[in-house]
Image: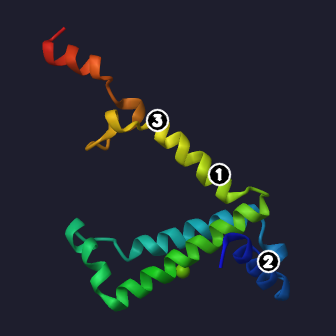
Amino acid sequence: MNLPEIQQRLRDFAAERHWDRFHTPKNLVMALAVESAELMEHFQWLSPEQSLDVQSDADLRQAVAEELADVAIYLIRLADKLGIDLEIAIQDKMQRNADKYPVYLARGNAVKYNRRKTPSEERNQEAGT
Ligand SMILES: [Mg+2]
């Protein structure tokens, strides 16, 4: 199923239940946040190593998959209600991320682009100038 097909199924699902009036952007963004929190709950208190083991726990992996689907459903529905082409928005954002994080500056570090030193600033810092 591609994104337009998913959007149509979500529209149909809401329309058949007369739920469209509840699917305001405000309600959808709140539902998205709630579902994101439900996803996070599965990882709460796990060590980084334990969080990697989620994929080998079949029951937990299934529960996480369901929350991921909930997040995706509300995200897709919200974009649809706002008339935002999610595929284009994702492509545009990925390009902006690539521009902000060129490989030669970002490889191997997780420093936010606006806190990163340029190579010449790093050389100056190392030289004490
Ligand atoms: Mg949920």
Q: Quadrant of the N terminus?
A: bottom right
- Image quarter for residue 3? bottom right
- Image quarter for residue 70? bottom right
- Disc 1 packing (10 Å; few <14; some 14–19; many ≥20): few
For mark 2, what is the residue?
Answer: 11
Disc nearest the viewer among 1 and 2 = 1
Q: Inspect the image, locate mark 1, and give the three-letter code of the amino acid beneath it.
A: Ala
Kindly identify which numbered label has been placed on residue 100. 3
Q: CA distance from mark 3 to mark 1?
A: 16 Å
Q: Position of residue 128 (x, y in %)?
A: 15, 12
Q: Residue furthest top?
A: 129
Q: Inspect the image, locate mark 3, and give the three-letter code of the amino acid beneath it.
A: Lys
Residue at (32%, 34%) from the top-left corner? 104
Give whichever of discs 1 and 2 has the lower sequence position: 2
Give whichever of discs 3 and 1 has the lower sequence position: 1
Secondary element at image label 2: helix
- Up the image or down, 71 lies above or below 102; here it is below
Give whichever of discs 3 and 2 has the lower sequence position: 2
Q: Is residue 127 left or right of residue 110?
A: left
Q: Quadrant of the C terminus?
A: top left
Q: Inspect the image, locate mark 2, and give the three-letter code of the amino acid beneath it.
A: Arg
Do the residues bearing badges 3 and 1 touch, measured as CB atoms within 8 Å? no
- Disc 3 packing (10 Å; few <14; some 14–19; many ≥20): some
- Disc 2 packing (10 Å; few <14; some 14–19; many ≥20): some
- Image quarter for residue 55? bottom left
For mark 1, what is the residue?
Answer: 89
Secondary element at image label 3: helix
Residue at (14%, 13%) from the top-left corner? 127
- Up the image or down, 119 lies above or below 95; here it is above
